[in-house]
Amino acid sequence: MNIEKISPEMAVKLSQDPHRTSTQDREKVLEIAIGREVRAFRKQKEITVAELSSQTGLSIGMLSKIENGNTSPSLSTLQTLANALSVPLTSFFRRFEEQRAAVHTRSGEGVELERDGTRAGHQYNLLGHIGANTSGVIVEPYLITLSKESDVFPVFQHGGIETIYMLEGKVDYRHGDEVHALLPGDTLFFDADAPHGPERLVELPARYLSIISYPQSLG
């Protein structure tokens, strides 16, 4: 299984800018949150867009834009929708106002644990965990330490996508039918459903970050 190297052309395709914090972005998030709630309440009432249009006097096109987060409805429009759906006006904002969790793990305080398939001498420290969330994605960040006593085990398999970032030491890491020589500063990003794991411990101790992400439904 081939692993592509990142090229400038691939980077251009990325749709998210992690540094964008404009008011426009925040307004867009609010529009999407409102739209999701309007659609959810409409479906809960088991009425069609056409029926809601008839009840509110709003056009089908306008309702479609609202539900898809493509327009910013006025308060009077939201009040009309709230009356038609028999819900409080504030209920349209509940997802936008939900608390977002953050986990701060201080140096040395990661929870040491054993994962499925853990081998002798493989030390896993979970650096943080957020369960069910609005993103629909679970992310598990681990700090993995391989000592002189570690077994090699190149056939881990699990769902999701994994990212490895090498911090210390040198390891030959297998993914599918290929072996990658990982040095400090190297990154390996791969489909974790293929057999993978350290095949040869070249220089020890070795430490790397392993970040696994998968849909909540796979948890």
Image (cartoon, rainbow, N blue to C red):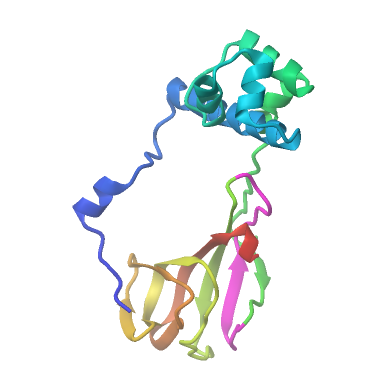
Q: Nearer the viewer, residue 74 or 133?
A: 74
Picture residue at 68% right of the left edge, 25% below the top:
92
Residue 25's place in the image compared with 177, above or below, is: above
Q: Quadrant of the C terminus?
A: bottom right
Residue 52 location in percent, x, y?
A: 66, 23
Q: Nearer the viewer, residue 62 or 8?
A: 62
Magenta span has 120?
yes
Q: Is residue 83 left or right of residue 207?
A: right
Magenta span has 121?
yes
Residue 146 location in percent, x, y?
A: 50, 80
Residue at the top extreme of this rendering: 76
- Residue 98 shows in this picture: no
Picture residue at 49% right of the left edge, 87% below the top:
155
Q: Nearer the viewer, residue 199 or 104?
A: 199
Q: Nearer the viewer, residue 145 or 161?
A: 161
Q: Is residue 100 left or right of residue 88?
A: left
**Quadrant location of residue 30?**
top right
Residue at the left extreme of this rendering: 8
**Quadrant location of residue 57?**
top right
Magenta region: which residues?
Answer: 117-134
Residue 187's place in the image compared with 27, above or below, is: below
Residue 1's place in the image compared with 163, above or below, is: below
Residue 72 location in percent, x, y?
A: 52, 18
